[in-house]
Image (cartoon, grey):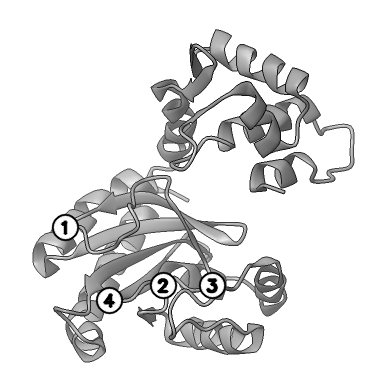
Amino acid sequence: MTDAAQNTKTLVPGDGYVQSFARGLAVIRSFSAEAPSQTMTEVAQRTGLTRAGARRILHTLHALGYVEIEGRQFRLTPKVLDLGFAYLSSLPVWSLAEPYMEALVKQVQESCSVAVLNGTEIIYVLRLPVEKIMSINLGVGSRLPAYCSSMGRVLLAGLADDDVERILAQTDRIARTPRTLTTPQALLEEIRKVRQQGWCIVDQELEPGLISVAVPIRARNGKVVAAMNVGMSTSRVNRTHVEQQILPKLLATARQINDRMVHSGSI
């Protein structure tokens, strides 16, 4: 069953649950880089809906301007970006963080990103790239697994152990490289270490040749609300360089963002 289909079948008891709305979101999520254009039947298969149900939702999205139709093919329109922009614009931290991230990128000449936790994954909400160092094409809205990414481990470290264990149990913990930690116990120990030291380095666990370092961004109450990282190629840097040269600058940038959030009255 696809992720979109699983989401439509999630049991949410109570009168406040609007199933048709949940199904509409599942249809939107069924489109991806692997499936940018779909037929009605393909949407139904990906979401677990009947063909008639998929038809009603697709034509509703078309009437609202979120989907375009060409022959038998359906595609999302740029209007869908309004949904994500509503989230970004509702939290001023992203606009507050960007100038500090720009300064950091100029200083270290490496890409810098901010992400938030969503279930077992992280979602990129800001990214300032220098050059392409990953085979994964990352941008705002991109998702990566939390268990093997530096920002994911920082975000998991902001949770209680019980919550971390639950998320790890729900995660498909595949070995993306020979270095990837996959067992719940090893990951929990690493996340506890990240929680204690306040930062995380992931060295070629997400992808061969990639090393990244991440730190938390906190709300005024101290809660971790996002993570910020710098990603680098191991052909240019090693772990010692990251710890001694990149990490202090990244921590300083995070402190600037946190201070700015406090003074501005943001989250």
> Marks 2 and 3, how far apart in space?
9 Å
> Marks 1 and 2, how far apart in space?
18 Å
Q: Residues within 10 Å of mark 2 (few under 14, many from 20)?
A: many
Query: Foreground residue, 87 or 201?
Result: 201
Q: Give, as a three-letter code, the residue at label 1.
A: Glu
Report if the CB atoms under discs 2 and 3 are less than 8 Å apart. no
> Marks 4 and 2, how far apart in space?
9 Å
Find numbered disc 3 in the image and state the secondary structure of the residue it sits on. Answer: loop
Report if the CB atoms under discs 3 and 1 are less than 8 Å apart. no
Picture disc at residue 46: none
- Is residue 97 visible in the rendered image? The answer is no
Where is mark 3, residue-wise? 147
Find numbered disc 4 in the image and state the secondary structure of the residue it sits on. Answer: loop
Query: Foreground residue, 254 or 211?
Result: 211
Nearer the N terminus, badge 3 or badge 1?
Answer: 1
Picture disc at residue 206: 2
Find numbered disc 1 in the image and state the secondary structure of the residue it sits on. Answer: loop
Q: Give, as a three-letter code, the residue at label 4.
A: Gly
**Percent coordinates x, y for residue 42 in the rendering:** 62, 31
Picture disc at residue 209: 4
Nearer the N terminus, badge 1 or badge 2?
Answer: 1
Image point (23%, 57%), residue name:
101
Q: Residues within 10 Å of mark 1 (few under 14, many from 20)?
A: few
